[in-house]
């Protein structure tokens, strides 16, 4: 019984530290993306929206974490974005659609 309890506690501690490491990687990626897009990351934080198992690039099982965040492109609105991490690696980062003024060409 004691060994089982230690294994469970060890798994919880591992999950906690792995989640902190993944969240920090997500925050850094979001900060860089917001800076590159010239938008403001609101509240300087991200929040976990989804957690599930997924396969990484090598076919191994890993945790897929989807974090949501809010940003503003003009300081008066709030837009939602998301960052997907497989393990501690950023797989997808979405900072929303870029608005183009009607007179500006897209190409």
Image (cartoon, grey):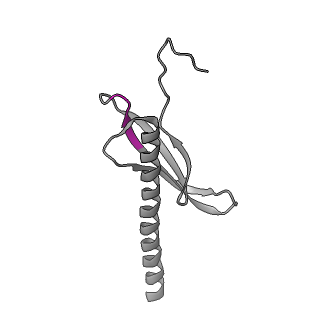
Main secondary structure found in the magenta portion: strand
46, above or below 101, in the image:
below
Q: Which residue lies furthest to the top in this view?
A: 103
> Can you give x and y, in whole percent of width and height, for residue 4 in the image?
48, 83
> Can you give x and y, in whole percent of width and height, for residue 70 in the image?
38, 39
Q: Which residue lies furthest to the right in this view?
A: 59
User: Quadrant of residue 38 in the image?
Assistant: top left
Q: In this view, does 19 lie to the left or right of 53?
A: left
Instruction: Name the residue nearer the viewer: 90 or 10.
Output: 90
Is the N terminus in the top left, top right, bottom left or bottom right quadrant?
Answer: bottom left
Magenta residues (range): 69-74
Q: Is residue 25 left or right of residue 89?
A: left
User: Quadrant of residue 24 in the image?
Assistant: bottom left
Which residue lies at the image location 42% right of the left edge and 52% below the top edge? 27
- For residue 97: magenta? no
> Can you give x and y, in whole percent of width and height, for residue 87 in the image?
55, 60
Which residue lies at the image location 66% right of the left edge and 63% below the top edge? 60
Give the mark count: 0
95, above or below 102, in the image:
below
Instruction: Name the residue nearer the viewer: 99 or 105.
Output: 105
35, above or below 3, in the image:
above
- For residue 72: magenta? yes
Instruction: Name the residue nearer the viewer: 42 or 2.
Output: 42
Which residue lies at the image location 42% right of the left edge and 67% below the top edge? 16
Residue 1 in view (yes/no): no
Instruction: Name the residue nearer the viewer: 19 or 93.
Output: 93
Which residue lies at the image location 33% right of the left edge and 41% below the top edge? 42
46, above or below 38, in the image:
below
Residue 7 in view (yes/no): yes
């Amino acid at each position: 019984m004691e060994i089982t309890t230690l294994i469970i506690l060890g798994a919880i501690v591992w999950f906690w530290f792995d989640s902190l490491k993944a969240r920090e990687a997500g925050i850094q990626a979001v900060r860089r993306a917001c800076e590159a897009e010239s938008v403001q990351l609101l509240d300087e934080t991200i929040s976990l929206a989804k957690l599930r198992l997924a396969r990484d690039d090598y076919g191994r099982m890993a945790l897929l974490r989807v974090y949501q965040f809010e940003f503003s492109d003009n300081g008066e609105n709030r837009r939602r974005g998301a960052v997907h991490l497989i393990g501690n690696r950023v797989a997808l980062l979405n900072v929303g659609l870029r608005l183009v003024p009607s007179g500006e060409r897209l190409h």
